[in-house]
Image (tube, rainbow, N blue to C red):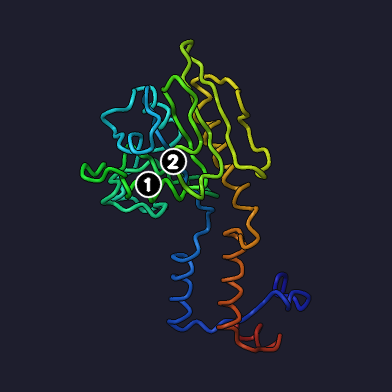
Amino acid sequence: FGWFSRNNRNFLDWLDTPLKFKRSLDQLDKDIPGREMFKIGLIYVMKGQEDEKVILRNDQSMVSDLYEEFVRGMATIVDLENHSGYFGKLEKDVSPKMAYFATCTLELAFHEVTRMKTVERDAQQLRKKRHVGNDQIHIIWSEHLRDYYPMTIQSQFNDAHIIVYPLPNGLFRIQIAKKQGIPHFGPLIHNMVVSKQLLPLLVRQTAINAHKLVRSQSEKYRGPFQVRKDAIRGIIKKFKLEKDYYSLIKDFV
């Protein structure tokens, strides 16, 4: 019988498949995705900007062509109205478009300050702050002459910052700032200088690695694959039919 031999009995279960079973499988895909999800803050700093309120008011009309090229090198710009992937809890009325990246194992949503709508009457830009302030990892593109201060965006989160400074010679200086106790992550390291071609890929991967590292330090964290595995086991246990080996094979054949 090959796979259905008696030696594999412990790996075979016969399941009752009523409508509730099919609904459970549908709900599994909705509640527990098969890929790991990341949301990362993306902040643009113009020359002369050092204040949180000023930086959070930046929009797409203010960004440099170099910054926009960098963002599009890291991600695809998607319309949230038609987007079927991960949103990173971003509402359509806050940011109609979003920078998004995905592979077969992960989805990455960027909370980009300049693509979120600026509310003119809100001096603090609370809608933008609510998203960026809750991100554990920030990528900052700074065209200011002085180094970016990591506490510029006040929050209890923001565990690590990857800061990019364009240089006059066409290269880019990297600054890494992280909270005390967070181990080293890469591939980018503090004060490294990289080319324009490699910059988007290296920054994105460094942000993903930093996010994984910070997330793994929580004792309560369980990866999506383990969570999904446990959920599938729960469904099997709920709909499992008690059958002996011969009854199982007879019904199958």
Tags 1 and 2 in contact by the CB under 8 Å rule? yes
Q: Is residue 127 visible?
A: yes
Estimate the x, y position of residue 85 in percent, counting from the top left.
Answer: 40, 52
Q: At 27% from the left edge and 43% from the top edge, which residue is drawn? A: 123
Question: What amino acid is at disc 1?
Answer: Lys
Above or below, 81 relative to 65: below
State the residue lying farthest toward the left: 121
Q: Residues within 10 Å of mark 1 (few under 14, many from 20)?
A: some
Which quadrant is the C terminus positioned in? bottom right
Question: What amino acid is at disc 2?
Answer: Ile
Q: Quadrant of residue 5?
A: bottom right
In terms of depth relative to the viewer, which is nearer, 1 or 75? 75
Residue behind mark 1:
129
Estimate the x, y position of residue 91 in percent, counting from the top left.
Answer: 32, 53
Estimate the x, y position of residue 62 in percent, counting from the top left.
Answer: 29, 28
Q: Quadrant of residue 226?
A: bottom right
In terms of depth relative to the viewer, which is nearer, 209 or 234? 209
Residue behind mark 2:
153
